[in-house]
Image (spheres, helix red, strand yellow):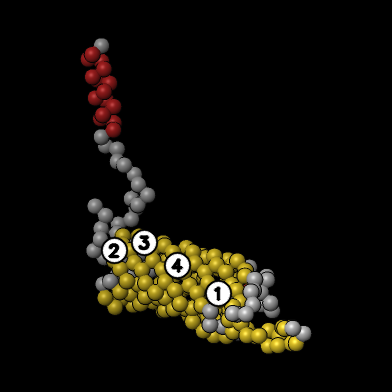
């Protein structure tokens, strides 16, 4: 009986030893991480200006996945309002901010100049700002695909230039404004600082 048990145990061990523990990242050969600011030029309510933000992500070979945030309150909107029985022109600043997931693909990033693409999937809000009046705000969904080129300035600093389109959905309560006033072609400058997998290899 003891001999049979030992034979059974040795058979189980022989099957288990060659097996390897599989993980989510088995197919990736290099990894890294980065963070940095970004500047987005776009139009809001017909006024061209800059949205400023930043983001960070985990690098897996030629792909990255992380998060971002953007915002501005530079655009103006003037509304005619009845104030104590008198029609007055009231000026508002348009606050627009959003953030969420950030996906990217940068093939052949070991070359000094290479393709850079990304997709931002975010949520946020828009509101009219004025010290004298309370105004409603809208919750938004924002989708921003972009494509362009990136330059390796150093091993740890990459500078990207892209063009794309920001699609916004959810504007319903802001006076005289709608989704098309926030949806716009964009041009973006992205600064990425970090390690990009050139020297970091999986064991």
Q: Residue 92 appears in which quarter of the rendering?
A: bottom right
Secondary structure under tag 3 reads strand
Q: Which residue position is annotated with label 1?
A: 96
Q: Residue 154 appears in which quarter of the rendering?
A: bottom left
Q: Is residue 110 above or below residue 44?
A: above
Residue 156: image x %, image y %?
Answer: 28, 71
Q: Which residue position is annotated with label 4?
A: 68
Residue 192 visible? The answer is yes
Q: Which residue position is annotated with label 2?
A: 197
At a point 39% along the width and 66% down the height, the residue shown is 56
Q: How many angstroms separate mark 3 from mark 4 (CA)?
A: 12 Å
Marks 3 and 2 close (CB-CB < 8 Å) = no
- Mark closer to the chain start, 3 or 1: 3
Secondary structure under tag 2 reads loop
Residue sticking out furthest to the top: 1
Q: How many angstroms separate mark 1 from mark 4 (CA)?
A: 14 Å
Neighbourhood count class around disc 1 (C-alpha, 10 Å): few under 14, some 14–19, many 20 upward:
many
Which one is closest to the eye, mark 1 or mark 4?
Answer: 1
């Amino acid at each position: 009986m003891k001999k049979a048990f030992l034979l059974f145990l040795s058979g189980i061990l022989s099957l288990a030893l060659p097996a390897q523990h599989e993980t989510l990242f088995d197919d990736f050969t290099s990894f890294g991480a980065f963070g940095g600011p970004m500047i987005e030029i776009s139009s809001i309510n017909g006024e061209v200006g800059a949205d400023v933000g930043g983001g960070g992500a985990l690098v897996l070979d030629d792909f990255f996945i992380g998060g971002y945030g953007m915002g501005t309150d530079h655009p103006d909107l003037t509304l005619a309002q009845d104030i104590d029985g008198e029609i007055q022109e009231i000026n508002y600043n348009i606050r627009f901010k959003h953030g969420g997931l950030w996906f990217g693909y940068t093939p052949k990033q070991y070359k000094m100049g290479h393709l850079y693409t990304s997709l931002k999937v975010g949520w946020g809000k828009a509101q009219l700002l004025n010290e004298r009046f309370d105004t409603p705000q809208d919750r938004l969904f924002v989708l921003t695909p972009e494509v362009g080129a990136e330059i390796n300035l150093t091993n740890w600093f990459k500078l990207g230039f892209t063009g794309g389109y920001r699609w916004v959905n959810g504007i319903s309560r802001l006076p005289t404004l709608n989704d098309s006033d926030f949806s716009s072609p964009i041009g973006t400058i992205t600064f990425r600082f970090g390690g990009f997998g050139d020297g970091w290899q999986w064991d």
